[in-house]
Image (cartoon, helix red, strand yellow):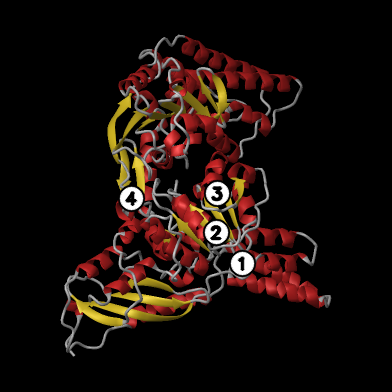
């Protein structure tokens, strides 16, 4: 059993490092990730780096870039400078494209390696951002970098993987269809993607310098208005009907206003003014016999509300023509909300936050809000003393406005690699919207305040990760939560929503997630796997009986043109058998002499099942439809004796059957809609043959429970 332990561990890892040694500027835990990801990129054409926030994923990505002649980075606009400076430190000059530019349809510079930072932003395949990137992946290897690949559901992860994988690419590993797996048991999905994934918590990765511990504080529930006014405002907002959008959309708009009220009276008042302005425009249009378009609906939301705007417009909501009388009644209801807001004389929530910051004196604190108006109101309550507000690309301090990057440098000069500012420019409090929640190095801070709760645990985790990072000089990071007052919580359900999504993330392998009142929830299935894989080396073939094991285990070996893949499977267990492997590794060696030959029938059956799934036609409906359209077009080309076109269509069909990522499917659908015969040859040139093509499977190790073994 002792001899087979490395083989079991290799089966959990899935790929063996190929001997490449990463650059010496990586920490040991980063070098380990880089070795495994380098092999995964070669074998699968893509990989997922899902380490928890703060472990230095950008360093790992740049180390991998040294293996490629060209690299393109797709990063949030706010992080372009940080990535460019970090790459220059190691003599690298990758090309960059921002997520925001992709949303506008920008071109992705062609490169051998495409690194997608904060990749969870591409989890929705219906967005223009996703479509633009997917169509331009081409023959690049793709490295997805995100601490939170799952935001809402398993399908989030599937859509990311489909950027470089065909739907049936992992059939040999137990996933006949990725899209179907996204709606199935999460354990089966994790089992199949394990060979191309590295996802570790700090506790498992064990960086040389421990990250600061997280010390949570109590959850603060304080109203944003005078106690007596809050229920009146909640009822007044509940009476709004939003007649220009109808009953299907009005609950979303009411929820939006309630969320703004949960932030601050200033934020709610700003939204009410935008709604009134919209009603004025709608009334003018009604008198002309017209209706406002979707573009006008965007005026309902400010720069802080991109997510809410996407929900509204993504729901298919289209403004409709409404009688002037209905608009006037709605205006009266909005006037009532506005009148109540004007009666607000105090905000216990803001007062509690101001007191908290003042108690911390000169310690650096990041305060996250959901609204620019709230951030400015908090700064005013603090007298703008050593305070900066960041929302978007611009920052604001007492003396005026300047670039957000400069504000980050004044607030966290050590983390940003800047000189310490003069005392007159020192910043101790950074009040920011979630534009500052991803990727930034702000670990000069040792306090994080969730003044407004986001809608997902992803944002909670990302926010704390600005302070809890490698290179922090602090031993601990304090975290505070401000939850909505009870009348608002009952209608918004933010806390319950975050808890539910955190449970999904945890089940789907996130190494770390967060919830309200729990700043750190550690130990998903992939993280448990990582805790057991030290000591991976060349596999030792063999068979053993052992005690303390409930089910037989086998390690399968698949050969491919770009590298080999290993996988642990368990009899009767289709999911990731982490716990069974842990039992086997903990077992004492057992005497196996005199026992009968091992029973490999169940493992052989599993192999046959995988081979059959891999050799069967693709199960994805879109691929089947494309194949039918190609065959129809091929019959026409054969009838017209256009043999060159027929040959191109045959090549296209073979390429499609072998498997292509989602962007190739979309590009092929466009080619099918056109009438250019040369489009198919161009498509084949742009989308080379897919990976992996795994075959030649065999069993390298078998471990059976001693109690089930029979004497020979």
**Mark-to-mark CA distance, 4 and 2:** 24 Å
In the image: residue 113, left or right of residue 438: right
Disc ID at residue 624: 1
**Mark-to-mark CA distance, 3 and 2:** 21 Å
Residue 62 in picture, x, y percent from top left: 50, 54
Residue 348 in picture, x, y percent from top left: 35, 17
Disc ID at residue 434: none
Q: Which one is nearer the viewer's eye here, 666 or 530?
A: 530
Label 2 sits on residue: 142
Q: Which one is nearer the viewer's eye here, 696 or 145?
A: 145
Q: Nearer the viewer, mark 2 or mark 1?
A: 2
Q: Residue at x 42, y 55 (%)?
A: 26
Q: Nearer the viewer, mark 1 or mark 4?
A: 4
- Tell me which numbered mark, 3 or 2, is placed earlier along the sequence: 3
Q: Quadrant of residue 211?
A: top left
Q: Residue at x 24, y 80 (%)?
A: 544
User: How dense is the environment of label 4, judged by Cα within 10 Å: few (below 14), some, or many (20 and up)?
Assistant: many
């Amino acid at each position: 059993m002792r001899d087979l332990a490395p083989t079991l561990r290799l089966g959990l890892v899935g790929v063996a490092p190929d001997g490449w040694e990463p650059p010496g500027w990586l920490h040991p835990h980063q070098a380990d990730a880089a070795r495994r990801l380098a092999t995964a990129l070669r074998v699968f054409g893509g990989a997922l780096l899902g380490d928890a926030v703060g472990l230095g994923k950008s360093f790992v990505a740049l180390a991998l870039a040294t293996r490629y002649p060209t690299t393109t980075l797709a990063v949030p606009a706010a992080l372009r400078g940080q990535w460019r400076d970090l790459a220059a430190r190691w003599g690298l000059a990758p090309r960059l494209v921002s997520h925001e530019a992709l949303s506008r349809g920008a071109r992705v510079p062609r490169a051998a390696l495409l690194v997608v930072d904060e990749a969870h932003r591409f989890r929705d395949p219906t967005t223009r951002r996703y479509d633009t990137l997917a169509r331009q992946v081409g023959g690049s290897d793709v490295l997805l970098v995100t601490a939170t690949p799952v935001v809402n559901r398993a399908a989030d992860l599937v859509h990311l993987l489909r950027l470089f994988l065909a739907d049936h690419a992992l059939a040999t590993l137990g996933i006949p269809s990725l899209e179907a797996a996204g709606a199935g048991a999460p354990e089966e999905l994790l089992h199949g993607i394990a060979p191309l994934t590295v996802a570790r918590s700090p506790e498992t990765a064990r960086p040389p310098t421990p990250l600061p511990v997280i010390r949570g504080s109590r959850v603060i529930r304080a109203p944003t208005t005078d106690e007596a006014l809050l229920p009146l405002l909640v009822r007044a907002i509940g009476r709004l009907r939003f007649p220009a959008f109808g009953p299907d959309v009005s609950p979303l708009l009411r929820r939006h206003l309630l969320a703004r009220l949960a932030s601050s009276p200033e934020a709610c008042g700003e939204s009410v003014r935008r709604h009134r302005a919209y009603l004025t425009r709608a009334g003018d249009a009604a008198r002309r016999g017209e209706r406002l378009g979707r573009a006008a609906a965007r005026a309902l939301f400010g720069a802080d509300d991109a997510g809410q705007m996407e929900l509204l417009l993504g729901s298919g909501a289209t403004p409709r023509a409404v009688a002037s009388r209905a608009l006037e009644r709605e205006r009266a209801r909005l006037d009532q909300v506005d009148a109540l807001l004007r009666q607000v004389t105090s905000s216990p929530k803001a007062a509690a936050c101001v007191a908290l910051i003042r108690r911390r004196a000169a310690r650096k604190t990041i305060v996250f809000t959901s609204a620019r108006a709230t951030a400015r109101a908090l700064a005013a309550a603090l007298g703008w003393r050593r305070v900066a507000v960041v929302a978007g690309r611009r920052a604001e301090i007492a003396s005026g406005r300047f670039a957000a990057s400069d504000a980050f440098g004044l607030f966290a000069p050590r983390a940003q690699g800047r000189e310490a500012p003069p005392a007159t420019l020192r910043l101790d409090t950074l009040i920011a919207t979630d534009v500052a929640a991803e990727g930034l190095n702000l670990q000069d801070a040792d306090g994080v305040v969730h003044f407004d709760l986001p809608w997902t645990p992803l944002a909670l985790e990302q926010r704390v990760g600005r302070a809890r990072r490698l290179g922090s000089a602090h031993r601990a990071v304090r975290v505070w939560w401000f939850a909505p007052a009870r009348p608002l919580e009952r209608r918004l359900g933010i806390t319950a929503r975050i808890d539910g999504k955190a449970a999904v993330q945890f089940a789907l392998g996130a190494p770390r997630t967060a919830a309200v009142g729990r700043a750190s929830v550690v130990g998903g299935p992939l993280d448990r796997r990582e805790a057991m894989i030290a000591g991976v080396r060349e596999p030792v073939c063999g068979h053993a009986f052992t005690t303390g094991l409930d089910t037989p285990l086998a390690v399968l070996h698949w050969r491919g043109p770009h590298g080999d893949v290993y996988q642990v499977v368990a009899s009767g267990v289709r999911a990731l058998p982490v716990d069974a492997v842990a039992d086997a590794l903990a077992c004492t060696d057992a005497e196996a002499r005199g026992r009968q030959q091992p029973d490999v029938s169940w493992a052989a059956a599993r192999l046959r099942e995988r081979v059959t799934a891999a050799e069967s036609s693709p199960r994805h409906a879109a691929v089947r439809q494309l194949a039918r359209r190609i065959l129809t077009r091929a019959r026409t080309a054969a009838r017209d004796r256009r043999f060159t076109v027929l040959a191109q269509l045959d090549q296209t069909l073979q390429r499609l059957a072998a498997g292509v990522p989602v962007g190739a499917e979309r590009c092929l659908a466009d080619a099918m809609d056109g009438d250019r015969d040369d489009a198919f040859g161009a498509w084949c040139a742009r989308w080379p043959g897919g990976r992996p093509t795994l075959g030649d499977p065999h069993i390298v190790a078998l471990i059976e429970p001693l109690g089930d073994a029979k004497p020979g």
